[in-house]
Amino acid sequence: MSFIEPKGTPSHLRVLLDASPDGVAIFGPAGRLLDANGRFGEIYGLSGKDVAALSFDQYRRYVLDRVADHAWPAVEAALGQLAPDRPSKLEIELELVRPETRFVRLWAAPVTDSDGRCLGQVSFHRDMTDQRRFEQELGLRADLPDINPFPVLKCDAEGHVRFTNLAAEKLLANLGLPCERVTEILPSDYRKHLRAVVERWSGPLRLLHEYGDRWLSLTVSADPQRAECMVVVEDVTEHRLADEKIKRYASELEVANRRIREAQAALVQSEKMASLGNLVAGIAHEINTPVGSINANSDVTIRALAKLRTLLASSPREGTESPDVERMITMLEELGQVSKSACERIVNIVRSLRNFARLDEADRKKADLHEGLESTLTLVNHLLKDRVQVIRDYGNIPEIECYPSQLNQVFTNILVNAAQAIKGKGTITIVTRSDGRKITVVINDTGTGIRPEHVAKIFDPGFTTKGVGVGAGLGLAISYKIVTDHGGHVDVDTEAGRGTTFTITLPVS
Amino acid sequence: MKGTKASSIVLVDDEEMILTSIKNLLILETDYRLAAFSSPREALEFIGAHAVDLVISDYLMPEMDGIEFLARVKEMQPHAVRVLLTGYADKENAIKAINDVGLFQYIEKPWENEDLRLIIRNGLEKRSLLRRLEEKIAEVERAHAELHDVHREILKAFA
């Protein structure tokens, strides 16, 4: 029997075939296509002409060309078994990837006559694409119900975003991004990261990405078995802003803290200065009385000796003309002179002390810095004598408006440090210069220098290398503040083993 | 007139060494009569009983300060020359005292002997000049009074 109907006469069978939602194809034992419905051509994207000329071999090749790589071996084996002269039953799903992804389920069954002779092969082809897609969707959604508040993206290993959950869609809407441009919220090199996560199956990778004015934290994890990645997105803009605020507050606090420590140091210093002032006033007063007496007595001694000489000359007695008498008188006169000089020196020291404390003048006035330097040198002389040579290179500098007692403190600090830095013998050089707009006072010592790791800290209040209890480490901090308050600045240049140079620059006006 | 009587100087300082220094200077170089006291109260007793030409006093003393002392001296013998010995810190008070108490001069410790001598000499000279002036004025007044009496007599004679 032939079930090939003559063309042109629709029969029930024909109507059924044409109406079927599945594709039907019948191949004869020689492999030629005997009949196929329109749906068959549709499913495979073949025109009527192509279908009419199709042979089974061609069909098989067509399928194998388009089947997904991972499925190729199984499909090849199955279709290989399926020679039309050796028909058998077959059910297989074909995943075709070219030109686009389609899933086609194939049923094939032999057609035999009542005698068992092979008449051919009938095959049914069902387009499962929609169903499989739906299942994938479902699979993608399975672990991401819509109540999940975190935006989640699912990508394949190549970085194509396959799925966005409800929260993700809301996020995109807030950012003003249409869903197709979802990858814009990912960093430009996100594919690299996805690959890395998938290949190494490493733990979740955290990325921070700025999109517009929002900061997004992306946590990428991978499921290598399913070759898909999950990216959880979190808008951390507020957190970042809070972080930045905290950082700002912290640095402001640090500045305030430093200011407080400086103010404290200044307060301590001014209290010290006040008690120093009282001390100096008392000492100066006390010293002046005995010094006055010694000075006057030395002077009277000299005068009395002059008179003695005259007396002896006018009424010589035996022995009084001897040169020894004259020598003795001369010696006493000289001693008297030396005592007077010594008193002058004491007076000078007391004056320097007063000058240093500037007890009489706590105000801003025009002062000659050389005077201050000399006062200071007098006062620190005990640290220098016989050990440290002082070289003065004083330029022509104008008087400047300043607080002289404060600047004297600065000179003292630096000179004392210099003297202490010089172990054994050494030299301190003081150079002063002015260019009319500013004055520079350069104090150099040939001491041990400052270690590089300390240099940045020497002006910090409380920093000292002298050990606990020796000093409070405030000297340079206060000096720095005094100089900057005067509108100037302090620079330090040092080399371990060679010495240190402090350069104080002050504006003339 | 450089009087036959040498000038009389009173020294007051609670520090003995200062008295010794100034005393010996003046003994060596001058012929002034000297009286030195380390207690201002004793000095005031002396000044109450003796005429003095010049008084030098220290400022800071435990019993009373120099300005107060010299103020009392002024009350007792307004013609005596008053000199204050001050420390640097008391300078301002001394300057005020020049006006209040009528100091002739102040001198700072430590001093130069030559300066001290000069101040004393100048002070005494001023004193002697003033005395001579007073004497002259007294003379003139006496002469005037005499003249006045004579004038009256003459008028009476011719009345």
Image: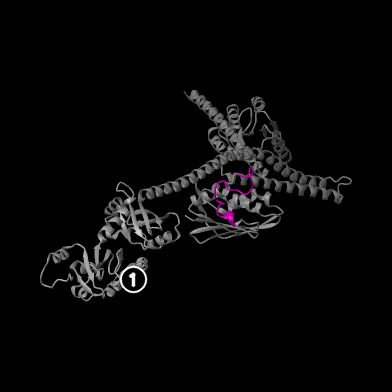
Foreground of the two, A471 or A479 = A471
B110 relative to A175 in the view: left or right:
right
Q: Residues within 10 Å of mark 1 (few under 14, many from 20)?
A: few
Would residue A468 be counted in the magenta stretch? yes
> Residue A294 placed where, x, y %?
71, 41
Label 1 element class: helix
**Residue shown at 51% from the left, 45% from the top:** A262
* Residue that numbered label 1 is attached to: A80
Q: Quadrant of residue A36?
A: bottom left
A17 relative to A329 in the view: left or right:
left
Identify the magenta region.
A452-471
Would residue B136 be counted in the magenta stretch? no
Q: Chain of mark 1?
A: A
Q: Quadrant of residue A455?
A: bottom right
State whether the magenta stretch is mostly helix, strand or loop.
loop
**Residue shown at 58% from the left, 54% from the top:** A454
Foreground of the two, A141 or A351 = A141
Q: Is residue A177 visible?
A: no
